[in-house]
Amino acid sequence: MQKMKAGIVGTGGISHYHLRGFLRAGVEVIAVADPALDRARGFAENYRVKNVYASHQEMLRVHPDLDMVSVATPNKFHAPIATDCLNAGVHVFCEKPPALNATEVAQMKEAAERNKRLLLFDFNNRARPEAQAIMSYIRNGQVGTINSAQAIWIRRCGIPGFGGWFTQKALSGGGPVIDLLHMIDLALYFMNFPAPAYVLAATFRDFASDKRFKGPWGLPDMEKAVVDVETAAHGFVTFQTGQVLFIRNSWAELNRREEVSVTFQGTLAGGMVRRLFGRDGLDETAIDECELYTMEHGLPVNKMILVTPDVAMGRETALINFVEAVQGKTEPLSTPEQALVLMKIIDAIYLSAEKKEPVSID
Ligand SMILES: NC(=O)c1ccc[n+]([C@@H]2O[C@H](COP(=O)([O-])OP(=O)(O)OC[C@H]3O[C@@H](n4cnc5c(N)ncnc54)[C@H](O)[C@@H]3O)[C@@H](O)[C@H]2O)c1
């Protein structure tokens, strides 16, 4: 059988996971597109991809036989590139955040529906073995209704470079709220995506120009760096169902260490998935945990679920899920509707922080 064909738009840090995910799923990557042609050529040479283009438009024009495209560019370009690809009739796997705001996500969703093509976003933390282990208990009814959850991605020194696209609101849409949205998404996934009602949040900009707060990775610093995004945020979301969600996200804040976690309290069981880093961003020292808290035989019981950790943090398996969903072999791990709810909450966090009052979500 002929292999399906994919293209990758953007050949920076995350694109390597896309490439490896496509290969593991048995898809041939026939082209890449990136205006940084030297980087794109190096990427293509490394992975033996035959065709390199300076733009996604050119790639789509030359290769009408593409089945799917992944988008791995700075956030500002997600919506226009994904929409062009959907309009060209290809299925799209797009990096997180889905776009700069909910209006853009609604337009992308409409383009996917109109063209009858799949649009999946890279919520790779859903694909992590720890998250799927918890989901198997939730699906089985062993957690009950999740009344309350806490979504946390906090760093101490984790600004991803000074002045690159991550720290410029026009290119990124915001700081850690939008960049580290994974745990908010994971909590919503565990809670079965209830309809949000109100959001109350505050953002902070401390340490935004202090280079001691840069992470051990990220983009090189630029001359005359623009850093006009938040460095920390705290928020609270209520849902029409009565459920509630507490949020903490930061790149730079005086926390003990980097923590990535969702904890939740259900009517039958509580639980958590957590990654604790030894130091900000240093994966090899990280500890992954996954637990449930129940009552059994009248006794409080803590269950430690043992899974084989995924060093790629679900980034390749999320892409494999996309390919298998395109092939009709499995259900997609996320839907554009869920991405829209998530982005409405993120828009509301920024609006509430700006207005200094609670805001409602339709
Ligand atoms: N899921 C995850 O765990 C994860 C991790 C890191 C980054 N990301 C997301 O991936 C995306 C890319 O991040 P990154 O760290 O790889 O960034 P990066 O800066 O390393 O790479 C981005 C690449 O996109 C290219 N580019 C810019 N404009 C383009 C355009 N119009 N068309 C094609 N290419 C273009 C740049 O030249 C660059 O090579 C972001 O949306 C980011 O939020 C996700």
Image (cartoon, rainbow, N blue to C red):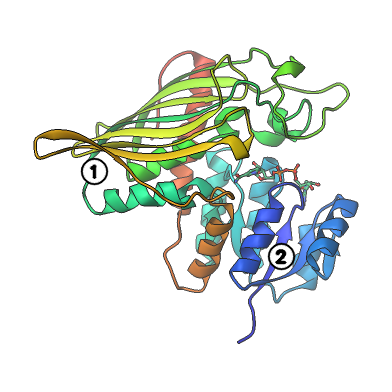
Q: How crowded is the residue under tag 1: few (<14 C-alpha within 10 Å), some, or many (20+)?
A: many
Q: Is residue 115 above or below residue 260?
A: below
The answer to whether mark 2 is within 8 Å of ligand 1 is: no
Amino acid of disc 1: Val
Ligand 1 shows up in the quarter that is top right
What percent of the width, then of the height, locates residue 93?
Answer: 59, 58
Q: Which of the marked residues, 1 or 2, is nearer the chain's N terminus?
A: 2
Q: Quadrant of residue 84?
A: bottom right
Residue 227 visible in image: yes
Q: Is residue 185 above or below residue 9?
A: above
Q: How crowded is the residue under tag 2: few (<14 C-alpha within 10 Å), some, or many (20+)?
A: many
Q: Quadrant of the C terminus?
A: top left
**Decide: marks 1, 2 in contact (CB < 8 A)?**
no
* Residue at the disc numbered 1: 143
* Residue at the disc numbered 2: 7
Element assignment for label 2: strand
What percent of the width, then of the height, locates residue 352?
Answer: 48, 20
Amino acid of disc 2: Gly
What percent of the width, then of the height, locates residue 138?
Answer: 28, 48
Q: Is residue 275 above or below residue 335?
A: above
